[in-house]
Image (cartoon, grey):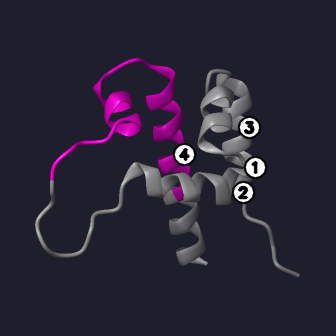
Amino acid sequence: MKECQLLKNIKQLKLKYFGHVVRHYNLEKLCLEGAVGGRRGRGRPRRRWTQVSQDIFDWLGFSVREASILAQDRDGFRSAVWEATSYKDPQ
């Protein structure tokens, strides 16, 4: 049960931060939407926000574009996040 609560908190924080970032025009939004040119060193590639878009789709059921539009309506986005992170008993 603790693992479920931890996962719920992580999902909630990630989605809330996404909503916060897309509602404002700032450096974080530019980093979220933009791409950095150049090459990266060897090793495992880092997880990028573009890959997190799959998480947003899985959790909310919206594409990143649709979720960005929904985030402009704070109450609607909060209810969508609450719905996505509420615990549903698998019975």
- 4 vs 2, front mark: 4
- Which kind of residue does numbered mark 2 sit on? Ser
Q: Which residue is mark 2?
A: 86
Q: Residue furthest front?
A: 38
Q: Are marks 4 and 3 in contact (CB under 8 Å)?
A: no
- Which kind of residue does numbered mark 4 sit on? Leu
Q: Left or right: 4 with respect to 42?
A: right
Q: Image quadrant of residue 63?
A: top right
Q: Are marks 2 and 1 in contact (CB under 8 Å)?
A: yes
C-alpha gap between disc 1 and disc 3: 6 Å
Q: Using the image, tell me which numbered label, if any, was put on residue 15.
A: 4
Q: Are marks 1 and 3 in contact (CB under 8 Å)?
A: yes
C-alpha gap between disc 2 and disc 1: 5 Å
Q: Please determine whether, in this image, residue 29 is positioned above or below residue 13.
A: above
Q: Are marks 1 and 4 in contact (CB under 8 Å)?
A: no
Residue range of the region highlighted in magenta in the rendering: 11-38
- Residue 52 in the magenta stretch? The answer is no
Main SS class of the magenta portion in the image: helix
Q: Quadrant of the C terminus?
A: bottom right
- 4 vs 3, front mark: 4
Q: Which residue is mark 3?
A: 79
Q: Residue furthest bottom?
A: 91
Q: Image quadrant of residue 68?
A: top right
C-alpha gap between disc 4 and disc 3: 12 Å
- Which kind of residue does numbered mark 3 sit on? Ser
Q: Image quadrant of residue 74?
A: top right
| Residue located 48% across and 55% down the image | 52
Q: Residues within 10 Å of mark 3 (few under 14, many from 20)?
A: few
Q: Quadrant of the N terminus?
A: bottom right
C-alpha gap between disc 1 and disc 4: 12 Å
Q: Please determine whether, in this image, residue 24 is positioned above or below residue 57.
A: above
